[in-house]
Image: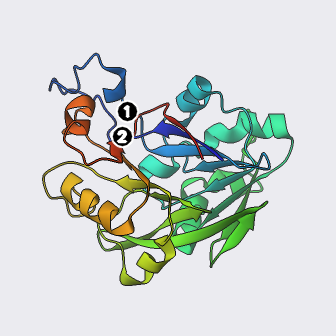
Amino acid sequence: MRVTFLGTGTSSGVPVVGCDCSTCRSEDPHDHRWRPSIYVELSDGTRVLVDTTPDFRSQALRFGVTGLDVILFTHYHADHIMGLDDVRPINFRVRRAIPCLGDASTLLALRRVFSYVWDPVAQKGGGLPRLQLFEVNGRFSLGPTNVVPVPLLHGTHPILGYRLDNFAYLTDCSAIPDCSWSLLEGIETLVLDALRHRPHPTHFTLEQAVEAAARIGARRTYFTHMCHDLPHAETNAVLPDGVQLAYDGLVLQL
């Protein structure tokens, strides 16, 4: 399995529009963060995109995403879905509809926000993305890879993380429900939300993320969804062994 981080920033990205803090002015490329998403290439060649951010077109061009077999959605917030229309060129290349999987609330939001995709009288213009929506109701397989949806809380909003074999991607969470801890046993590589130091109602702080990572006990943990309060080098210097900030373009060979 090969995992590419397409984006590791929070909903505003980094640098933040209009901000002149040291992180937003940083020349370290690790401090430049697009909205959060990963691209996973499975052992059988299946290509999986997790979330379609507003930056997806730029992410795909920069990191060479030329094909997709399935899209997994964690939830329906704008920073996770608004790039969906930009899969159209990939439709043209693969010559088929792309399955999109998510919970019921996410699929409802996709139908509402991108209503023209499913409107039989919509003007086609430059073409419409070809998408098939499937509700995630439990475990499933993508080729030889076992996929386990992991219930999370994003504030009071229930969302999904995903476990793919021994890799788990848990973005946008402020709590891991009791029912989900057992689903994370045996994880070797963990990606976890860590927004900033200050408390936030819908995201783990860095300190809460460190605590959750220790409980999960993965061999390697990478934090994502960071805001400009967490400069890359300075933050990495104080993290425990085996824990680090992810960055845009980071590739994991698992």
Q: Is residue 110 left or right of residue 193?
A: right
Q: Is residue 229 left or right of residue 35?
A: left
Q: Residue at x 81, y 35 (%)?
A: 92
The vertical placement of 101 against 254, above or below, is: below
Q: Mark 1 and mark 2 in contact (Cβ < 8 Å)?
A: yes
The vertical placement of 60 against 161, above or below, is: above
Label 1, secondary structure: give it.
loop
Q: CA distance from mark 2 to mark 1?
A: 5 Å
Q: Residue at x 35, y 27 (%)?
A: 30
Going from the N terminus, do you reach mark 2 or mark 1 first? 2
* Residue 33: mark in rendering: 1
* Residue 137 appears in the rendering: yes
Across and down, in percent, residue 39 comes to 60, 43
Q: Is residue 249 left or right of residue 121?
A: left
Label 2, secondary structure: give it.
loop
Asked which quadrant contains residue 11, the reply is top left
Across and down, in percent, residue 20 comes to 16, 23
Please give the count of numbered marks on the rendered protein.
2
* Residue 9: mark in rendering: 2
The vertical placement of 123 against 72, above or below, is: above
In the image shown, does 160 or 166 lie closer to the viewer?
166
Q: Amino acid at mark 2?
A: Gly
Q: Amino acid at mark 1?
A: Arg
